[in-house]
Amino acid sequence: MATRETAYDEPARGAGLAGVLEILRRRRALAVVPFVFVLTAATALAFFLPSLWTARALILVNRQQIPETFVRPTVTTDLEARLLTLSHEILSRPRLQKIIQDYRLYPHLRSSHTPDQIVDRMRKDIRLELRSEDERIRRDTRSIAFAVAYTATDPRIAAMVTNTLASLYSQENMKLRERQAVGATEFFEAQLRDVRQRLVEQERKVAEYKERHLGELPEQRDTNLRTLERLQQQLQLAHENNRRANERRQFITQSLAEIDQTSGLANAGGSGPNVTPADTAAARLTLLRQELAEMRTKYNDRYPDVIALREQVRVLEAKVGAEGAAALPRQAKAAPAARKDGKELRVAPQNPYVQSLMQQLDQATVDAKTTAAEIAAFNQEIKTYQRRIENTPKREQELALISRDYETTREQFRSLLAKRGEADMAADLEQRQKGEQFRIIEPAMLPERPAGPNRLRLLLVGLALALGASGLAVVLAEQVDTSFRRVDDVRTALPLPVLSAIPRITTERDRLRSLRQRRLATAALAVGLLVVAGSSFAVAHNNQSLVSMLTATETTAKR
């Protein structure tokens, strides 16, 4: 029976290592092509990618030189938060554009990228690294450090840019702390002005209230009580004096009345004073006039008692005038008449005893009036102080409401004044550069080895990918190829007997055609390799982004 043309008799080798080797021998050309292409691409990338150099500057954060128990700093944010603020300031577009122009960075990107894209690229090349593992830093518990790193294709440029960035961090930290300290001082000063104005206004209100209610204030309660007690004692004494003066006056008046009753009798035996009717009338007239004058101080002239008393005075004046004219013409002429306005005009009696009684009566009247005026004054003062004492609880409550806001404002003013003093000291501390500082302890030097790429690692990865591509091509070819390679395959696939196997016959023409095909394949392979190498060069030349990505991937893999 005829078999397929491609079938020929081959010894059975099994499905183990011998089978794999047989497949590789038969598919060696197909296995070599992807292996060479992939390895060439990986090798070209490894050699054509630019080297990136990373320079680092170590900055030590020196704590405040004066202990914080004496001068409290106004900047209390932690280092990470402050570095974030400083980074926003330093990595701003104007600053980075100035650095790019000064050092002529990224010349190959200027034609194909916008300025913002170039600035973003530079931001990606700058890194901040907190350091805590350094032995020098661990020895000083009051200090910490961080590193500024910059990556570039030129190690010299990387070192210069890194030192520039480190200087900017040190300068901007000093400016930031000084601005915050001065800002805190200005803030407290503005708050003090407002609180001082409120305090003055509240002090004015308290002073006006105390002046308006002087004498009724809580702190004057004890004084008012003592004064009220003293006034009551004086009032009792005045009442006693007034009572005595009135009793003395009443006694003298009775004496004069008795003299008036006995004035018509003769002074027999010298048993009494020689008092004439004129003297008695003059004394009674004086008493009535005094009583009329005192009553007029209380009532008007139309008051009935005033009218009656005034009529008695008129009658008695007429009597005194008649008796005086009869007895002593000269004295009656010399005695002044009473004025029409009712003011007191004394008709002086001639008897010494009556004159003495009249003087005593005048003194008793004056004492009675004086003590009465004192009693009225004391009563008025007592009422005043009683009203003050009664109003003291009310004033105390009102004053407490006013003083509460005043005390709160005063305490706030004192607190702000103390804080302003601390802010002034902190600002002076920053201006004298005694506060926390960034000190560059290790400036950036020329890096000794590039940060990336790791060319040996890339070659190994390329070799692994080439082997994988070669094996994948062979497996796919074997899966697609359905030709029979052995007689056993034919017997297995077809239920027909195999009579014989015809070996492959190669003629001269077949040999020449095979040689021509090999040459064409070699030429195509060479051209393909050149294309792959050129493409790899185009992709890898000055491709810092790819190097950065590969370096970051390697760093992540190590971690």
Image (cartoon, rainbow, N blue to C red):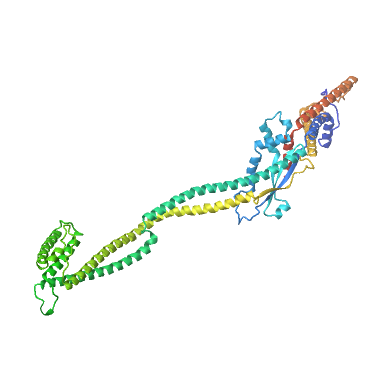
Tell me residue 365's x, y (percent).
21, 67
Nearer the observer, 321 or 38? 321
- The residue at the point 71 percent across, 34 percent down is 101
The quarter of the rendered structure image containing the C terminus is: top right
The quarter of the rendered structure image containing the N terminus is: top right
* Number of marks in the rendered image: 0
Say whether residue 285 is left or right of residue 498.
left
- Vertically, is 511 above or below 128? above
* Quadrant in the rendering for residue 479: top right
Q: Please, which residue is most extreme toward the right here?
A: 508
Q: Please, which residue is most extreme toward the front here?
A: 330
* Quadrant in the rendering for residue 333: bottom left
Nearer the observer, 25 or 118? 118
- Residue 478 is at least partly visible in this image: no
Say whether residue 385 is left or right of residue 542.
left
- Vertically, is 279 above or below 544? below
Tell me residue 188's x, y (percent).
54, 49
- Vertically, is 499 above or below 377? above
Tell me residue 25's x, y (percent).
85, 31
- Vertically, is 93 above or below 266? above
* Quadrant in the rendering for residue 300: bottom left
Nearer the observer, 375 or 45? 375
Nearer the observer, 444 or 296? 296
- Residue 245 is at least partly visible in this image: yes
- The residue at the point 23 percent across, 65 percent down is 369
Q: Please, which residue is most extreme toward the bottom here?
A: 269
Q: Please, which residue is most extreme toward the top here?
A: 509
Tell me residue 441's x, y (percent).
73, 48
Say whether residue 11 is left or right of residue 381.
right
